[in-house]
Amino acid sequence: MTGHQWGYGEDDGPSAWSKDYPIAEGPRQSPINIVPDEAVYDANLPPISLNYDNCTSINISNNGHSVVVEFDDADDRSVIQGGPLNNAYRLKQFHFHWGGKGCHGSEHTVSGKTYTSELHLVHWNAARYGSFGEAVAASDGLAVLGVFLEIGDEHRGLHKITDALYMVKFKGTVADFRDFNPKCLLPRSLGYWTYPGSLTTPPLYESVTWIVLAEPIEVSEKQMGKFRTLLFSGEEEEVRKRMENNFRPPQPLNGRAVRSNFQ
Ligand SMILES: NS(=O)(=O)c1cccc(F)c1F
Ligand SMILES: [Zn+2]
């Protein structure tokens, strides 16, 4: 398995990543199983503040691991701050992890409960670093906002994304995707758990302050089905592999404290 050739299959999946990415067995890996009763309520944790109003999505793409919506991060127009963060972190991209059928597919779990999918909004510390590429390997470089998706009613905000997925069916495809504001994908409550962790995909850098929202959003089975029409494989590849189960299982907590801003 050469550096850029990792996946979620039998031979190149999460249990094999440590061969090329030894940090896979590091002390602050993600995701984790969140146990609410063991989380430390921290009354000093301020609310998180999201300013996505002038956000500028650029494109939607299939990178062979997930579907990604990228943003123009040339200035502080879409930022997250507050909560456990000491600076404003700039929105770079968001993507999803999901399962096959049924209710598994999320990366973080809550007392062992899995959700059908998990949305990750990836932000980088533009106050301290010059670019995402520089921040991605720094211990305080990234802040990822995690949102659980569960099967229920259709989600009106998700439609724009699921209706665009046909344009990025194959690995390596990109399509214009402008003026999408991810604020519409957030639940009513911004109550969260936070802990120090890592990217959940190679290179697995331990550079992420995780902020996981406790309240899931509801999406329909039909909408999730559209994610599963995506392929891990490129258009030219013989064998077509459906893009599903692109999640890493929970990793050891190693004594880390998970804090919450709610009781
Ligand atoms: N799954 S993930 O949110 O940890 C993640 C994945 C790829 C690049 C990132 F910067 C990142 F944060
Ligand atoms: Zn992710």
Image (tube, grey):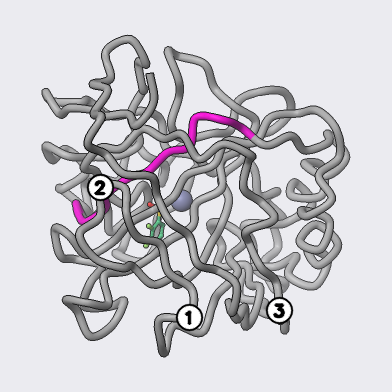
Q: Is residue 154 magenta?
A: no
Q: Which residue is mark 1?
A: 77
In the foreground, 256 or 52: 52
Q: Residue at x 27, y 13 (%)?
A: 38
Q: Residues within 10 Å of mark 3 (few under 14, many from 20)?
A: few
Out of 91 and 20, give the one closest to the viewer.
91
- Near-viewer residue (66 or 210): 210
Q: Is residue 209 magenta?
A: yes
Label 2: element kind: loop
Answer few, some or many: residues within 10 Å of disc 2's Cα (few below 14, many 20 plus, some between 14 and 19). Answer: many
Viewport quadrant of the C terminus: top left
Horizontal side of residue 255 vs 57, given as left or right: left
Which residue occupies the extreme bottom position in the image? Answer: 74
Label 3: which secondary element: loop
The structure residue drawn at horizontal position 54% and vertical position 34%, both measured from the top left corner, is 106
What residue appears at the point 74 percent right and 34 percent down from the top-left corner? 218
Q: Secondary structure at mark 1?
A: loop
Provide the residue designation for mark 2. 84
Q: Are marks 1 and 2 in contact (CB under 8 Å)?
A: no
Mark 1 and mark 2: Cα distance apart in space: 20 Å
Instruction: Please report whichever mark, 2 or 3, sits nearer to the chain's N-terminal start.
Output: 2
Marked residue nearer the N-terminal end (1 or 2): 1
Q: Position of residue 196 (x, y in %)?
A: 21, 42
Q: Is 90 placed above or below 225 here?
A: below
Mark 1 residue CB less than 8 A from any atom of ligand 1: no
Q: Indicate left or right for 56 with 91 as reference.
A: right
Mark toward the start of the polypeptide (1 vs 3): 1
Q: Position of residue 142 (x, y in %)?
A: 28, 61
What span is in magenta? 206-216
Amino acid at dot 1:
Arg
The residue indicated by pointer 3 is: 179
